[in-house]
Amino acid sequence: MSYNGVDQIDYMVDDGGDVADSLDEEHPTADDDDDANLDEYDMLMKVTDTSSSQAREGKDIQGIPWDRLNITRETYRLTRLQQYRNYVSLPSSSEEGVDKGLKPAPKGGNYFEFFHNTRLVKPTILHFQLRNLVWATSKHDVYLISNYSVMHWSSLHQSLTEVLDFSGHIVPTERYPGTLLEGFTRTQLSTLAVKDRFLVAGGFHGELVCKCLDKPGVSFCTRTTHHENAITNSIEIFDDLSGLHFMTSNNDCGVREYDLERFQLLNHFRFPWPVNNTSMSPDRKLISIVGDDRDGLLVDARNGKTVASVVGHQDYSFASAWHPDGRVLATGNQDKTCRVWDLRNLSSPTAILKGNMGAVRSMRFSNDGEFMVVAEPADFVHVYSTRENYETRQELDFFGEISGVCLSPDDESLCVGIWDRTYASLLQYNRKHTYQYLDSLM
């Protein structure tokens, strides 16, 4: 991630704007009476949850009252597609430089169905390029960043609880070699990862905070670097033969691997450019490295030496993910494409998947390998069928900036965090089967 980009954008999100504000500015109501307009504003603000049964009866999944507005959903969608500005770091990857003949894969997949939209949950985004801020540990348990807090949403109990508050003073309650005993004050969170019983959060100045979810307090605090350009861009938690490990990607061009049981630094690899995302291969032999360069790298997990490159993107990449079979890697880029690579032949991608209006900021493969989930910065999440060679997709269509997308470990639930001043929420979709779920929490 370019540090200049941070300065220019000042930690703001892409120019998607607030949905309610843009609706009001571009398509005011016909009644110019002040009281009527005030009622209209109050109506927009009084948005409620939406269930699957209500959605089937015609209610908008986000609760946007289209019948009360002087614009249809279809017209506003066309307006968003025309006016949304995708951020690029390299001029050559602007609309003139991207493959003009490339079109999105045909729609037609129907793999997940809308289940619930929860308005009590208010996801937020601090840096417009970093969107890995929503994680699920089960079908019913989701962790996310909301302002200065890490929150836990339980759909089973319909409860939202604060896990950690970073607006004050965070200090470790356990002592490990290398821990920063004085902790941190008012930490600006840039990224998050949650797996099993562990949570790891990263900050704008290289802060790392580790918490065991089944223990009170914070287990470990450290600062990865004192480099002035130290933002933690992404964190991945993964299983290793010796237990759980986690890996951080930083703007100081470093990748660091830690033991999550003893919180010890195991490896520190350096690269020529800021690293935005890493992903460990299923066999634990290779690490995918993407960052402020057009090309991605595959490096030896033992020593960090480059063993191969993936060449084809036209801008900087911020997402990567491995298929569970370990032979397929996907990379997501600001050139608005996701590229799928087969390790047996890296000379060209096996698929180039174009988004609708923005960069690929987040992606996940399902644990069973049947689907690849790709999130744009706003409005769209695409679910591709790997069985159909990524040629068919399901398009999840809504309005608002995406703070993150995640699949539950059993692949039964897909959650999307929506950042918006009016319509912020957590969207939940459930996997479709030959049988239908009851509209109740199970």
Image: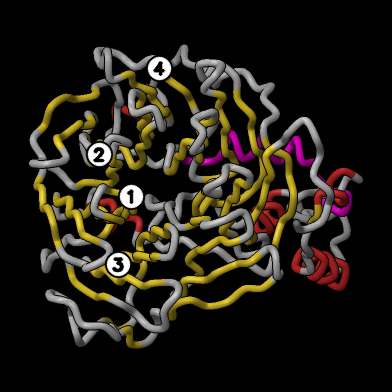
Q: Spatial distance from mark 2 to mark 4, Cα to Cα?
A: 34 Å
Q: Is residue 322 left or right of residue 69?
A: left
- The amino acid beneath tag 2 is Arg
User: According to the image, label 4 marks what residue?
Assistant: 99
Check if mark 1's residue and mark 3's residue have beta carbons within 8 Å: no
- The amino acid beneath tag 4 is Asp
Report the residue at 38% width, 24% height from top.
Answer: 339
User: According to the image, label 3 marks what residue?
Assistant: 203
Q: Spatial distance from mark 3 to mark 4, Cα to Cα?
A: 35 Å
Secondary structure category for the residue under label 1: strand
Say above or below: 252 vs 341.
Answer: below
Q: Answer with mark 3 or mark 4, whichever residue precedes in sequence.
A: 4
The picture places residue 348, in percent across and down from the top left corner, at: 30, 13
| Nearest to viewer (mark 1 / mark 4) | 1
Q: Answer with mark 1 or mark 3, whichever residue precedes in sequence.
A: 3
* Residue 374 appears anywhere in the view: no
Check if mark 2's residue and mark 1's residue have beta carbons within 8 Å: yes
